[in-house]
């Protein structure tokens, strides 16, 4: 690994270290959501097989109820994942904002005379806000999608 990558990783870990517990919980929720998404088709398959075999109505009602309960739980988990992803990104980037502000306040007056206050606010808050949105979406969508893909491939291999 190059020195530049090592510096980037240590820089990122510096801001993510205070929220490592929330990130671990977020990972557990992502794994749970993925497991639920993998279970849903199995329930539907069982329902269709039972209906095709003219199974008992009680069994079909139980499978339909189970499907609905799991679907509601998955939606609730998705809301918590979204909240936690945004919370983690905001907490991590708030420290970055504070560090950037300290850095800017230490700069000489020549720098402050060249930059307008609006430009400074946009650079400190706007750019960091864009990074915050990126981290929130990256964690919740990209990592979740890779976990789901691995789960689908595993289920397909087993079946």
Image (cartoon, grey):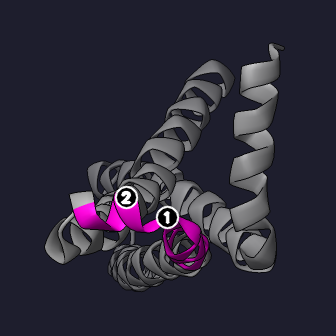
Q: Name the spot of residue 116 as percent of width and height, x first.
A: 17, 69
Q: Which residue is label 2 attached to?
A: 111
Q: Can residue 40 be seen in this view?
A: no
Marks 1 & 2, CB-CB < 8 Å contact: yes
Q: What element carries label 1?
A: loop
Is residue 23 or residue 108 the one in the foreground? Answer: 108
In reply to whether residue 12 is colored magenta, the answer given is no
Q: Which mark is residue 108?
A: 1
Q: In this view, does 139 lie to the left or right of 51?
A: right
What residue is shown at x 73% (from left), y 49% (from top)? 11
Is residue 111 or residue 37 the one in the foreground? Answer: 111
What residue is shown at x 33% (from left), y 81% (from top)? 68
Looking at the image, is 150 positioned above or below residue 34? above
Q: Name the spot of residue 157 as percent of width and height, x first.
A: 64, 19
Q: Is mark 2 on a helix, strand or loop?
A: helix
Magenta residue span:
98-113
What residue is shown at x 46% (from left), y 56% (from top)? 135
Looking at the image, is 84 positioned above or below residue 8? below
What residue is shown at x 68% (from left), y 25% (from top)? 158
Corner quadrant of residue 103: bottom right
In reply to whether residue 99 is colored magenta, the answer given is yes
Q: Is residue 119 left or right of residue 155?
A: left
Numbered disc total: 2
């Amino acid at each position: 690994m190059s020195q530049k990558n090592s510096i980037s990783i240590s820089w990122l870990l510096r801001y993510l270290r205070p929220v490592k517990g929330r990130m671990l919980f977020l990972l557990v929720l992502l794994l749970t959501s993925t497991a639920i998404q993998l279970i849903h088709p199995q329930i539907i398959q069982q329902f269709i097989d039972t209906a095709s075999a003219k199974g008992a109505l009680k069994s079909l009602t139980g499978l339909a109820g189970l499907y609905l309960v799991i679907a509601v739980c998955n939606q609730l988990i998705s809301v918590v994942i979204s909240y936690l992803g945004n919370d983690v990104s905001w907490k991590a980037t708030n420290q970055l904002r504070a560090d950037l502000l300290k850095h800017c306040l230490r700069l000489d007056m020549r720098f402050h005379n060249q930059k307008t206050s609006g430009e400074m606010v946009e650079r400190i808050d706007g750019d960091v806000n864009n990074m915050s949105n990126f981290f929130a979406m990256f964690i919740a969508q990209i990592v979740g999608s890779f976990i789901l893909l691995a789960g689908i491939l595993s289920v397909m291999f087993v079946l």
